[in-house]
Image: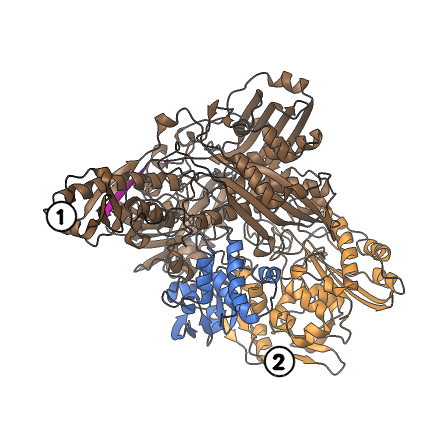
Amino acid sequence: MDKDKIVGKPISRLEGKLKVTGAAKYAAEYEVENLLHAYVVNSPVTKGKIKSINIDKATALPGVITVLSHINRPKLAWFDLQYADMDAPPGTVFKPFYNDEILYNGQPIALVVAEDFETARYAATLVEFDFEEKPFETFLTDHTEQARPPKFGLATALKPPPPPPTGDFEQAYQDAAVKVESEYQHGTEHHNPMEMFATTTVYNGEGKLTIYDKTQGTINNQLFVANVFGLKYKNVRVLAPFVGGAFGSGLRPQYQLLLCAMAAIHLKRNVRLVLDRKQMFFFSHRPPTKQNLKFATDVNGRLTAMAHTALSETSSYEDYFESVASWSHKLYPAPNTLFEQKVVPLDVCTPLDMRAPGGSTALHAIECTMDELAYKLKIDPLELRLLNYSDTDPSAKKPYTSKALRACYLQAAERFGWKNRTPEPRSMTRGNKLVGYGMATGIWDALQFPSRVEAIINADGKLILNNAVTDIGTGTFTVMTQIAADELGLSIEDVDFRYGDSQKPFSMFQGGSAMTASTGVGIVVATKELKKKILKVARKMDNFPFAKSDDKDIIFEGGRIYLKADPEISISFKEIVAFNKGRNIKTTNMGKPHMLKLRNYSKATHSASFVEVEVDIELGNVTVTRAVTAVAAGKIINPKTAKSQIYGSMVWGISKALHEETIMDKKLGKYINTNLGEYHIPVHADIKDMDVIFAEEEDELINELGIKGVGEIGLVGMPAAISNAIFHATGKRINSLPIHFDELM
Amino acid sequence: MAKTILTVNGIRHELDLSPWVSLLDALRDRLLLTGTKKGCDHGQCGACTIICDDKRILSCLSLAVAKNGSEITTIEGLGDDDNLHPLQQAFIDHDAFQCGYCTPGQICSAVGMLKENRATTRDEVSELMSGNLCRCGANKGIIDAIMQVKDGGHYE
Amino acid sequence: MNNFEYLQAADADQAINLRDKDINAQYLAGGTNLVDLWKYNLTHPAALIDINHIGINNTITENPDGGVRLGAAVRNADTAYHPLVEERYPLLSKAILAGASAQIRNMASNGGNLLQRTRCYYFYDDQVPCNKRIPGSGCPAKTGYNRIHAILGTSDSCIAVFPSDMCIALSALNARVNVIGLDGERSIDFADFHRLPGDAPELDNNLKTGELITSIDLPENGFKDHYSYLKLRDRHSYAFALVSVATALKLDGKLITEARIALGGVAHKPWRVAEAEDFLINKEANRENFSAAAELIVQGAKGYGDNDFKIALAKKAIVRNCMMALDPSSQQPGAQPSA
């Protein structure tokens, strides 16, 4: 009678119909009565002060309600701490409209509120400013001398600084048989989710707001709004049932939320604020970086020394930090190491985590350096990885809870046909194209946050689960339903997972590939407790047939409980709730990572990416014709949605390697390609054959479910695999991303 | 203000519109048909694709008043929960979306593309669908879904 | 982003007269560029005169001279897929299909394609100087980031490029542009339609104020046997050309009897060099001769730093595209290089 487990099945997204019929509603799409429309005015100046504002022309326009700025804004919180969301880096939080200071180009400096969208947008062009401009610094590589160690704080707890040096790097490097020294530069990138940031604020009377927001963290934003405007937590509700992509940009409350709420409170009206695509470039980005690596091996190819230093941009007011220099020693066991990372504060907006922050940056450099070593050693690049394979984490001197990277290498190599590669650059051709094969390793965190879940059995015998988490397209809704269904032996139709609402029990923001493990464990803990409560009620029933049976002899299956020994005897959840006078049976419990047990282990997901490129022999034009990525990420709850996560991040890898870059004009101190016509992400024509393998990886240590998370790992190895394939095709090492095809002519 | 008659998903609407209202904003803000998405508002992403007088166009670059008298089909008019358009079903089956925001535009664009009947190979389909960006990177699933419906030949 | 009047012209005369009444009125056909520019606060029309219903610009017909007339309001996609164009002017068809996206091609008019404005980053940002937008304000592109900018025919005041693909083919085909204005009708050689920036970069073309494009005439010879359009860009589709090439050849055996080579993405107008085309006459159709022609075409090219690569790229692209023209079946979706 043990029915098939739902976990592990490729279930189609449960919200699929809503999305393909256009019924799914995003933040700007809620029908609200007497709605006002707001539009942001952004600073054309990069650094300085607002000397004066003239709003006469704007307010003279029929339909304009008000123009808000630092001059006439309502009261805001004083203290930085009150603006500090859960993901705020150390420093002084940027406070929109707080004063006359301009800290970066595109900073919001006024807000027009009008009866309709068109009027607000036009009026925004009519607000006039007088600025005092100051000299600025916005270009990372022009100011490397200002690099300094970052400050660390609460939000950086998950991103530790690089591990301390080991051995004697300088001596080992000097003495080494084979060595490679290289520099890598990455440009700025913007998250650019398809849905532009938007907030609809419903004013529910004095101090009470219902907010539809684009966010990865409903509770993070609820606390932020309440703190900034001095409202009671319970009076601020943030809803985000559908989020049109975020990729990190929704980890922190963005300024449209604060300004929309400000306008609603000030006017005591319902207000909607949608950013335009250009404004999507005026908050949060992946910082540009410069990395320097020195790797050395003995004659046999065993790594003896590794040094990795990284500089990354941050703003003048907050120390954003992502781990770049920390990764190589988690993979490779060189005895002599030196890692260092510094930030360069510039007059830009604070960067923010963007899909595989730090890791995708670092592994590009590390895995291209490994490729260079392989060529110097005349060893197959895959062989070099296997030669330096470590089952443990050398940087922490701890075993991994599980690590099936070897299986990833071998299975992906087999599927890809790596053995057909002839190592010499430019040795493989196809018509007018040079063909290149490249491979690289990926590694990413396996995080888990605390998550509180309410589990309810209702009078219909159905399971309702409540948690504040969002589903930003990751499949959270579907996989949580699967997990819950198995825990209670229900079909997915009998499980109702409710999410995307700050009024529901606690969830961290959705990030770090951590949500499936976090919310999933919350569900396991809550449903376990719920089962006990169901039994407790059932045991009081007069006709309860197995009153004396032990808990472990009882099976939950198909909305009923059975006695293992005699499946003929059963009783339904419905009957139990009916006996409970129709009152729901419920419990709320917190799932937590097993900090103590895991203290002695390192945790990571791993991947291996194999890529074939074609490079036009004359014109340099590049196509990623094939890519295979194998991932070891513990148990896969839903192979269909998990594969999509990997495919998606492989596309991101292609984009990072070949397409996307935000261009900073250093004389103007501003980004100049602030639109989707000139900020290139791949189009369908860029995406050819892709394949994903999930390597078997049982992990009984990591958490109750053996889950590690798949949101980012698929991206990590791809840029290096592509760069290495391009080297193999052309004999050219291009260490700045994105690679422009003209560099390969 | 100009009287503008739009027949959307078979329903005739008489709207009093100012010339500066885009067809996209008329659909979303005035007719509350929010299935048509605003991803850039400048003709650079394809999220706002609709079928207007039998052709796929971008509603963000269209002025509503200039479309007076037009027949428009949006994602809401292609199918509903109980009667999905074959492309809608194929998108679900192939997991051809993640966040879902580009999805209505992708599907409307694919409907128009299949009607145009100019693509045979997968590469040609990909080329003719390249006006629809997907930031989640669901490109493979999207083209798989379209190819299945195209090869099945039952998309009218 | 101002509001404007929307006026529908019933015929060409009415359109011209409405335009004449208001210096700030503009014609509206497909709107794909105009609405975009308006939404970026770069143009501020007082009125838009809809010219889609004036009756004289929405067909594709054969001309008595054996050529074909393309109505100015006919959509780009309808033009590319029109049997007369597909069969007789496949170069034009391929070039149109290499531009923008399918949706935009369904909307954009032929006349509008000729009038689209540059995609220069600095032109598109209303908060920075730009001589094309505000004459005399300066050109940040010259010393800024200029990967997408011109290498030929630039001036001190402007290094913007003209972004069309369709027009590169029209240039190679020696099309003529028919216009109507207050002074009556006239016909303009394609080579004289667009202009180089010189010291008046605000002017993209030689239309007189208020003139309306009614049609484009294609001469009889459509080079249907030996043609190719190649477009090189930072992704495989839906991006503007860094360099594009339209090649049309007439061959007698291995000998070239007529050659047309037009470059896109490199100048303020489609770029053709008569000297190079003349050079190829009576020469064998081979890489060596095409390379020599390519040298002549990019003669005098000047890079501005980030776009230096365009000089070498243009030369290689010309050679490749001429070779592709020998076998038009080498055409790839999205005008990608031959396999």
Q: Quadrant of residue A91?
A: top left
The boundaries of the magenta stretch are: A446-456
Indicate left or right for C147 with B71 as reference. right
Image quarter hosting the C terminus of chain C: bottom right
The picture's colour for chain B is blue
Q: Can residue A625 be seen in this view?
A: yes
Residue A460 place in picture, x, y as percent: 21, 54
The residue indicated by pointer 1 is A580
Which of C99/C135 is in front? Answer: C99
Q: Can residue A663 be seen in this view?
A: no
The residue indicated by pointer 2 is C56
SS category of the residue bearing label 2: loop
Residue type for callout 1: Asn
Residue C226 place in picture, x, y as percent: 78, 67
Residue drawn at 27 percent across, 51 percent down: A558
Quote the CA–CA distance across marks 2 and 1. 80 Å
Residue type for callout 2: Ile
The picture's colour for chain C is orange
The picture's colour for chain A is brown
Whether residue A447 is in magenta: the answer is: yes
- Using a 10 Å C-alpha cutoff, classify the residue at mark 1 as few (fewer than 14 neighbours), some (14 to 19) or many (20 or more): some
- Using a 10 Å C-alpha cutoff, classify the residue at mark 2 as few (fewer than 14 neighbours), some (14 to 19) or many (20 or more): some
Residue A663 place in picture, x, y as percent: 59, 44
Indicate left or right for A135 with A113 as reference. right
Whether residue B42 is in magenta: the answer is: no
